[in-house]
């Protein structure tokens, strides 16, 4: 006959680390990442006046290359002389047909308009810039 089981003994020391297992199969390819940044282009257009004249208005429209849209733009004037004042009174996006875009439409270019106030001795030029990207 045997006696009652005695208490458990202390835990023994940890064993040695086993060998590295085999490499698992390659997982599926992940989804494509987001597109990187695009480099904008600048489209320009200019218009030069003839003889100076009080109230003379000039306009120019810079259109983006095909497949691109206008993100912004602006206008500047040059060439006017002493005593001659030229003001830019309109600078805005336009659609491909030159009309003003409505909410949700995609601008294709930029329109600028300038006005000569007073008289001077020089023709002037308006230059319009459109900042474009795909």
Image (tube, rainbow, N blue to C red):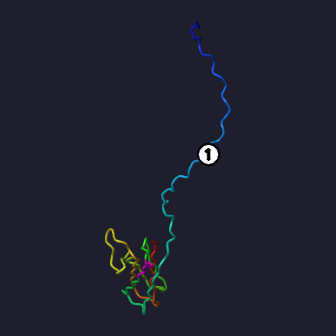
Pick the front one: 26 or 58: 26
**Where is residue 15, by image quadrant?**
top right
Q: Is residue 87 above or below residue 121?
A: above
Task: Name the spot of residue 127 as percent of width and height, x first.
Answer: 46, 82
Pick the front one: 77 or 3: 3
Residue at 50%, 68% (x, y): give it.
38
Q: Is residue 112 magenta?
A: no
Q: Is residue 64 magenta?
A: yes
Q: Is residue 20 above or below residue 113?
A: above
Q: Which residues are magenta?
A: 61-66
Pick the front one: 40 or 28: 28
Tell me: 133 left or right of 16. Answer: left
Q: Is residue 118 above or below residue 134?
A: below
Residue at the disc numbered 1: 22
**Where is residue 54, by image quadrant?**
bottom left
Residue at 48%, 61% (x, y): give it.
34
Q: Is residue 26 above or below residue 121?
A: above
Residue at 67%, 25% (x, y): give it.
13
Task: Name the spot of residue 112 as percent of width and height, x first.
Answer: 40, 79
Task: Name the spot of residue 47 as percent of width and height, x first.
Answer: 44, 87
**Where is residue 85, by image quadrant?**
bottom left
């Amino acid at each position: 006959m045997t006696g009652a089981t005695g208490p458990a003994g202390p835990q023994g020391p940890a064993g040695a680390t086993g060998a590295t297992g085999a490499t698992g199969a390659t997982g599926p390819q992940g989804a494509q990442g987001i597109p990187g940044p695009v480099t904008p282009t600048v489209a320009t257009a200019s218009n030069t006046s003839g003889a100076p004249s009080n109230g003379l208005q000039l306009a120019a429209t810079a259109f983006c290359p095909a497949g691109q849209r206008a993100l912004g733009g602006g206008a500047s004037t040059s060439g006017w002389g002493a005593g001659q004042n030229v003001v830019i009174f309109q600078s805005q996006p336009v659609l491909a047909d030159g009309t003003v875009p409505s909410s949700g439409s995609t601008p294709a270019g930029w329109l600028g308009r300038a006005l000569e106030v007073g008289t001077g001795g020089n023709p002037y030029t308006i230059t319009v810039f459109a900042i474009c990207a795909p």
